[in-house]
Amino acid sequence: MVHVAVIGAYGSAGAAVAGELADEPDVELTLVDDGDPGGGLCILRGCMPSKEVLSAAAHRYRARVDDRLVGAPPDVDLEAVVERKDDHTLDWAAHRRAGVEGYAERDDVTFLRGTARFVDGHTLAVGDRTVEPDYVVVATGSSVNVPDLPGIEDVDYLTSADVLDATAFPDSAVVMGFGYIGMELVPYVAEAGGTDVTVVEHDERPLDEADPAFGDALLDVYERDFTVDVRRNSYEQRVEPTADGGVRLHLDGPDGAETVEAEALYLFTGRTPTLAGLGLENTPLSPGEGWVEPTLQARDAPHVFVPGDANGREQILHVAKEEGFTTAENVLRHARGEDLVEYHPTHHHVVFAGLGVYPYARVGHSVASAEAAGVDHVAVSRRAADDGVFKSKDAADGLATLVVDPDDGTVLGWQGLHYHADVMAKTMQVAVEMGLDARALPDRAYHPTTPEILDGLFRAAVEELEG
Ligand SMILES: Cc1cc2nc3c(=O)[nH]c(=O)nc-3n(C[C@H](O)[C@H](O)[C@H](O)COP(=O)(O)OP(=O)(O)OC[C@H]3O[C@@H](n4cnc5c(N)ncnc54)[C@H](O)[C@@H]3O)c2cc1C
């Protein structure tokens, strides 16, 4: 019998490990979580509630920019938005808890509600219990990353969790952090809150994973439709409170020193693994670059596996789940003395930019990543405005790019920043992950639907391939 303890069993990664191992006949499982109410980040404060609140503001946005509609755009009833979001998330969270706690009805599975801590390399304390498992899965997720900026401890700041619960917004705000959380929540704060938003962008454009035209298209929409003031190539130097209770952020911008004053500061500065309080100092584990192998095994402790946000690699839901599945498989492999498998996901991201009206999605290679990897490729692009269907649906911004192998036509990658790009990610996942030949793909979307842009890309790629 192999005894496995999972710390963070309510989360997406921990629940995936638990689900895989609960029915294994030779595994004893101890599941631990201290969540209050418990249900994991994605359900309670991540993927799901963020899309829920965005949807309300998206309705207002679409009505506001459509000049065929007359009258003032409706206000977003923030109390109603938060109430409905809470109803849904608490329901989904209860479902997750019931599923995880349900495993404990089986023989050899125990659920402990509490905070786990390593007492030594092999012993965990949970309240007044101690557990000595053969394997420990650390699936403790992530916490808000507060940047090490002079003055940050002297000012109040708000985070993504505050935005999801907000029933009032400031008149003005300055935003640090323009990764996917910032790109999703900035338009929400502007649209639902009516807030004047200034964003600090370290580079020329956001969307580092995308080819440059996509970041430029996103900025065009944010500046035009949400009047967001994006300070490009700017770095925060220090922050201080103002006499009227706001903040003053000092920047080093392209033209030298500048300041931004606002009523509130939002930190969308990413997330850092939740490892504090775990007693890692009592173990050989030393978090940092390379501390978790592609097998999800900790480099310095072969009996410890770290899936999900806790390993700090790629903090998104499907990766957390798939890392959980790989962890379960590798725990069993390790116990049997077999080689471990590595987890190398195909690049697969969706950013619900522009309130989800103009999402960005990428599957597989961008042009830049194909070049960097030395992969032979041809690339074709198409503007959404070139397809009548996007105009007819009043969402003509954005573009898409397809990357294919010049020899055998294999689809290597796709990016879209346009209406419905999020739902096209699945189609393109099938094309990329199954290595389909662009020449063999059916040239037929139902007319008029937005996947006509994919047909346009496939046709353009075939023309390139056939010279
Ligand atoms: C605003 C926002 C929007 C997001 N949107 C998306 C999206 O659209 N798509 C997407 O793919 N991803 C999104 N994400 C990311 C996604 O939510 C996370 O990648 C995912 O939820 C991480 O799952 P996890 O299992 O690693 O961690 P979690 O779900 O956080 O689980 C960790 C669990 O560990 C428990 N725990 C921690 N420490 C201990 C301890 N010492 N003892 C016992 N229990 C402990 C916690 O209570 C928690 O239940 C978003 C995140 C945010 C913040």
Image (tube, rainbow, N blue to C red):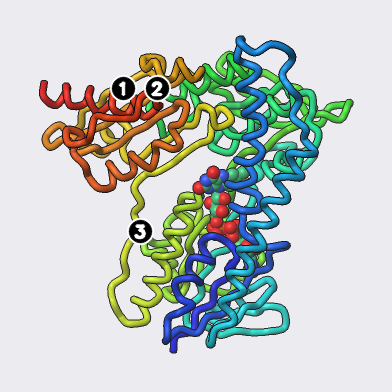
> Between 320 and 123, which is closer to the camera in this rendering?
320
> Type of residue at label 1?
Ser
Q: Position of residue 19 (x, y in %)?
A: 49, 70
Q: CA distance from mark 3 to mark 1?
A: 31 Å
Residue 405: quarter of image: top left
Residue in view at x 74 percent, y 24 percent: 195
Question: Where 113 falls versus 268 (above or below)?
Answer: below
Q: Quadrant of residue 117?
A: bottom right
**Front position in the image: 356 or 156:** 356
Farthest front residue in view: 447
Residue with the mark numbered 3 = 343
Residue 98 left/right relative to 403: right
Which residue is pictured at 73% across the width and 33% down the height? 265
Element type where label 1 sits in the image: strand
* Residue drawn at x 37%, y 44% as measured from the top left: 347
Q: Which mark is residue 399?
A: 2
Task: Give the residue at mark 1.
Answer: 381
Residue at the image point whose x is 21% and y is 42% from the top? 436
